[in-house]
Amino acid sequence: MGFQQRPAIAGKALPHNVVPLIPRHQAAKPRIVRVSPENDGLELLYANDRHPDTLFSVKILCWALLDNDDVVAMVPWLNAVVPSSALEDPLNGRWEGYRLPHSSYLFTEAPQYKADELRAAVQFFGKASASEEVVQEVPDAIGTHAVFSSDGFHSISLLEVVSWRLTGDGRLLAMVIEEGEVTSTPVLPGDPCLHAAQEQPTFRYFFQHQVANRIKERDPETLAAISVLAAEQDQ
């Protein structure tokens, strides 16, 4: 999850260096049947009660067509990948809409061209059965990192997410490199050395690249926020 300094929007000021980290434990329902990567920089906006005059921006990973025909934006939200409508937290956090990059234009419906693309793809390829079969694998374009820890965050490792694998049962799996299995470079989606982060017992959270870079730089504010996460996880 990543946050960037942005201009004011509709009378709401966006913050400097905000790193709110609130756990999320909700799977995407109904089932995802097709995804389309967000390649134009569209962002998701949300707010919470602690900062009533602030909008937070999050990079959108992809747009998903659900089996009820809805089209929603998907974002890595700490330990899950969730639709925009699922951005709820203990501070009464809520999704506010989408915005064009470097713009004050806000909207709340998925772009029509994305909805058309997704529905046309399902018509062409068909709808996969609800199984563990791989339906799609798309590259990560927002700098997502997976965080791993086996000792309560006393030590952590970060791996870049190379791609996202959609299975027939609607799961979006973050694929990371197993270094000992690399046989050629660059590592591209579909490479045998890629393994699903969420299936590793030491997987903890996702962060977009801004937060991941702060962790790598050992930024005190970011590390303190991660310590809070670790304490909440132990409760």
Image (cartoon, rainbow, N blue to C red):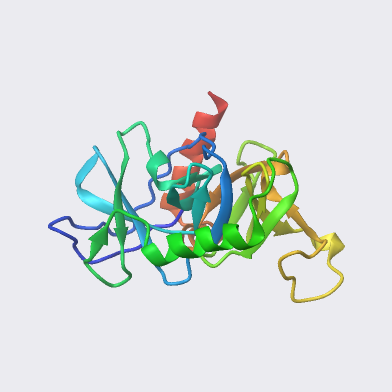
Residue 222 screen position, x and y as percent: 45, 51
Q: Front-most of 158 and 183?
A: 183
- 119 horizontally vs 203: left or right: left
Residue, far left: 11
- 3 horizontally vs 174: left or right: left
Q: Residue at x 27, y 65 (%)?
A: 6
Q: Where is 68 relative to 75, above or below?
A: above
Residue, far front: 123
- 151 horizontally vs 25: left or right: right
Q: Front-most of 126 and 155?
A: 126
Q: Front-most of 234 and 95?
A: 95
Residue, far top: 235
Q: Residue at x 37, y 63 (%)?
A: 112
**Camera sees residue 131:** yes
Total residue callouts: 0
Residue 55 screen position, x and y as percent: 26, 52
Residue 87 screen position, x and y as percent: 39, 41
Q: Residue at x 43, y 43 (%)?
A: 21
Residue 170 screen position, x and y as percent: 62, 44
**Camera sees residue 162:** no
Q: Front-most of 36 and 97?
A: 36
Q: Where is 75 relative to 79, above or below?
A: below
- 214 horizontally vs 163: left or right: left
